[in-house]
Image (cartoon, rainbow, N blue to C red):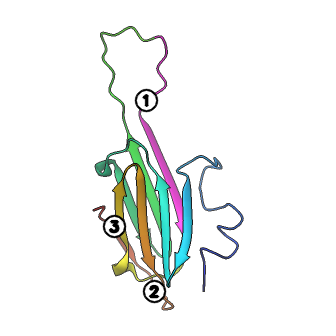
Amino acid sequence: MNYLGNGFFRNGLGFNNGEFNYLRTDIYEQDNVYYLKIEVPGVEKENIRVDYENGYLTVSIKQEDIFEETSEYIRKERVMSEKERTFYVGDIHEESIKASCQNGILTITLDKNDEKKETKKQIVIE
């Protein structure tokens, strides 16, 4: 069953706070593999967490900008933020999940699987 291409993502759903610019993501399918490309500009890979549990892939980031306390700021818009987005990807081969981060883009690949089982796994970002 093609979960990413049918209904759920086509309708723009799949994020949990209703903001469209919230971890903007491109999703496509090629040769029985799903690809997610997620914008994470300025975020170090150590501050990104990717988890898979029972058909759901969750991407979380935590970013904190450090300011010099001795400076007089006219305006401060960069502050600590935490963002999370969950995608229903269906049943995939959990051992094949890969994630890498380059140039502000987190790329996650997921091989499709027709078997159904309950699993939970944290994915290491290379």
Q: Is residue 54 above or below residue 85?
A: below
Is 73 left or right of 29, judged from the image as shown? Answer: left
The local secondary structure at tag 2 comes to loop
The local secondary structure at tag 3 comes to strand
Q: Which residues are magenta?
A: 74-89
Dividing the picture into quadrants, the one containing residue 53 is bottom left
* Residue kind at label 2, given as amino acid type: Lys
Is 71 left or right of 110, judged from the image as shown? Answer: left
Q: Which residue is mark 2?
A: 117
Residue 25 numbered mark, or none = none
Residue at image location 49% in from the left, 25% down from the top: 77
Pick whichever, 22 or 36, lies toward us.
36
Residue 123 numbered mark, or none = 3
Q: Which residue is mark 1?
A: 79
Eye-nearest disc, 2 or 3: 3
* Residue kind at label 1, given as amino acid type: Val
Q: Are marks 2 and 3 in contact (CB under 8 Å)?
A: no
How many labels sit on residues? 3
